[in-house]
Image (cartoon, rainbow, N blue to C red):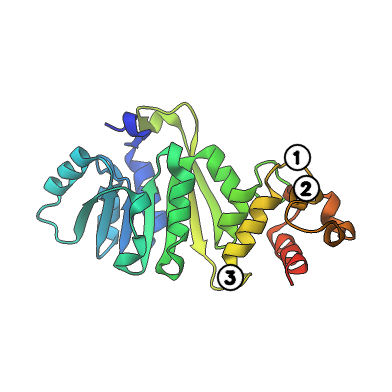
Amino acid sequence: MGRPLGQHFLFQHSILARIAEAACPQQVGLCIEIGPGPGGLTEFLHPRAKRLIAVELDSALAAKLRERYTENPTVEIVQGDVLSTNLSQWGPATVCGNLPYYITSPIIEQVLAMGPALERAVFLVQKEVADRLAAPSGNRDYGYLSVATQLFCTVERLFLVKPASFRPPPKVDSAVVRLTPRTSLPVADTKAFLRFASACFRQKRKTLRNNLSAHYPPEKLTNLPEAGLRAEQLSLPELIRLFGVLNP
């Protein structure tokens, strides 16, 4: 069932238990599980949450999960597309899931849009995506996704998961990441900053002067010490400082 939707289901109990513990080290009030599939992770999450809401796109899988938990009032199965679901509607929550590879970035963006309602997020993702999420500046994996995520959260890459732990096995390694929201954001207008960051990384191999020339007059860029650097060479605080200089 998972193959048409690009999902590989994790079945190894020891890893499922580690993911659930990383998401809910103590019992939480509400946990939202994204893409529960056949419910492997659900089994380990629901004892750690007073209430578990699982959002599943596949109607057949959702129906089977509803049948399994029909007598458990703490588990609610929502059949629908997570990308069109307001995850904040249920209140503050921990979010967890084995994310389909092909829509990982949009799902993470949707989760970050929860704002103060997001208490913690733990995801199983493709290793390459985990590397990009956690990458520091100067690293080859550092880019817009790194900046857009680290603006709102601290990112930890917790552990690797090999293909043999899945059915069907993917062709690449996976990794578990934990996102912990910042207590305060380092920039006031996050939407304007993310537009700026997107322009900075528009063509990664080009300098900031080249990437920003369509957005700012030449005289603003001429005397900037950073203008000859590439965006990947600037840390998040340095990008925020540059944003402030160019947008006083």
Residue 185, numbered circle: 3
Residue at the extreme right: 223
Q: Quadrant of residue 94?
A: bottom left
Residue 245 seen in render? yes
Q: Earlier in the sequence, mark 1 or mark 3?
A: 3
Secondary structure of residue under mark 2: loop
Q: Nearer the viewer, mark 1 or mark 3?
A: 1
**Amino acid marked by disc 2:** Arg
**Amino acid marked by disc 1:** Arg
Q: Nearer the viewer, residue 128 or 232?
A: 232
Residue 205, numbered circle: 1
Q: What residue does disc 2 label?
A: 230
Indicate the position of residue 19 as horizontal and vertical percent values.
Answer: 39, 49
Q: Earlier in the sequence, mark 3 or mark 2?
A: 3
Indicate the position of residue 166 as horizontal and vertical percent values.
Answer: 37, 32
Indicate the position of residue 111 as horizontal and vertical percent values.
Answer: 43, 57
Secondary structure of residue under mark 3: loop
